[in-house]
Image (cartoon, rainbow, N blue to C red):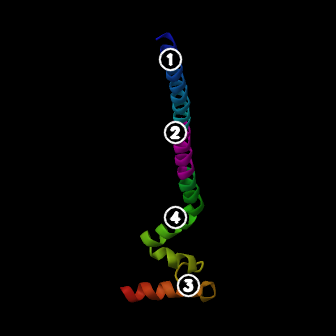
Amino acid sequence: MDEELKALLKSNLHVSEESLAILKKLNAARVMGSIMGVVKWVVILAVTFGTYYYFQPFLERGLDVITNPAGILEDALGNNNRTLDPNKLSPDTIKKIRDSILRE
């Protein structure tokens, strides 16, 4: 009985050591997953804010044109703000003016 008990204890010890190794690997994977989750959100937020910072001037100009359609004409007005200087008008501006007049 004594030899049989020793064999069972050795087997139990071996299984326990294997279980401990597996649990350590699982814990390391869990910690690494948590770290990578934080890194993923930091990258997502950094890209989002970086993109907004880069495109902010374009967005502001687009919102200015939408909220103030006369802003298109203000860029092309001369010094007295009553006459248009045709030399300052680009083809895109002429098209925008024509489209805004036709919509009214």
**Disc 1 and disc 2: Cα gap in Å?**
37 Å
Label 3 amino acid?
A: Asp
Q: Residue 8, position in %: x, y?
A: 48, 19
Asked if the residue at tag 2 contacts the one at tag 4, i.e. Cβ–Cβ closer than 8 Å, the answer is no
Q: Residue 19, position in %: x, y?
A: 51, 29
Residue depicted at 54% across the width and 29% down the height: 18
Q: Is residue 13 above or below residue 88?
A: above
Q: Residue 30, position in %: x, y?
A: 51, 37
Secondary structure beneath label 3: helix
Q: Which residue is mark 2?
A: 34
Asked if the residue at tag 1 contacts the one at tag 4, i.e. Cβ–Cβ closer than 8 Å, the answer is no
- Name of the residue lying farthest toward the right: 87
Q: Is residue 65 above or below residue 31?
A: below
What label sits on residue 53 in the rendered view?
none
Asked if the residue at tag 3 contacts the one at tag 1, i.e. Cβ–Cβ closer than 8 Å, the answer is no
Name the foreground residue: 47 vs 18: 18
Secondary structure beneath label 2: helix
Q: Is residue 9 above or below residue 81?
A: above
Q: Which residue is mark 4?
A: 60
The crowd level at tag 2 (other Cα within 10 Å; few <14, some 14-19, many 20+) is few
* Earlier sequence position, callout 2 versus callout 3: 2
Q: Which residue is mark 1?
A: 9
Q: For residue 44: magenta?
A: yes
**Quadrant location, the C terminus:** bottom left
Asked if the residue at tag 2 contacts the one at tag 1, i.e. Cβ–Cβ closer than 8 Å, the answer is no
* Earlier sequence position, callout 4 versus callout 1: 1
Q: Quadrant of residue 87?
A: bottom right
The residue mark sitting in front, 1 or 2, is 1
* Earlier sequence position, callout 1 versus callout 3: 1
* Earlier sequence position, callout 1 versus callout 2: 1
Q: Which residue is mark 3?
A: 92
Part of the protein shown in magenta: 30-45
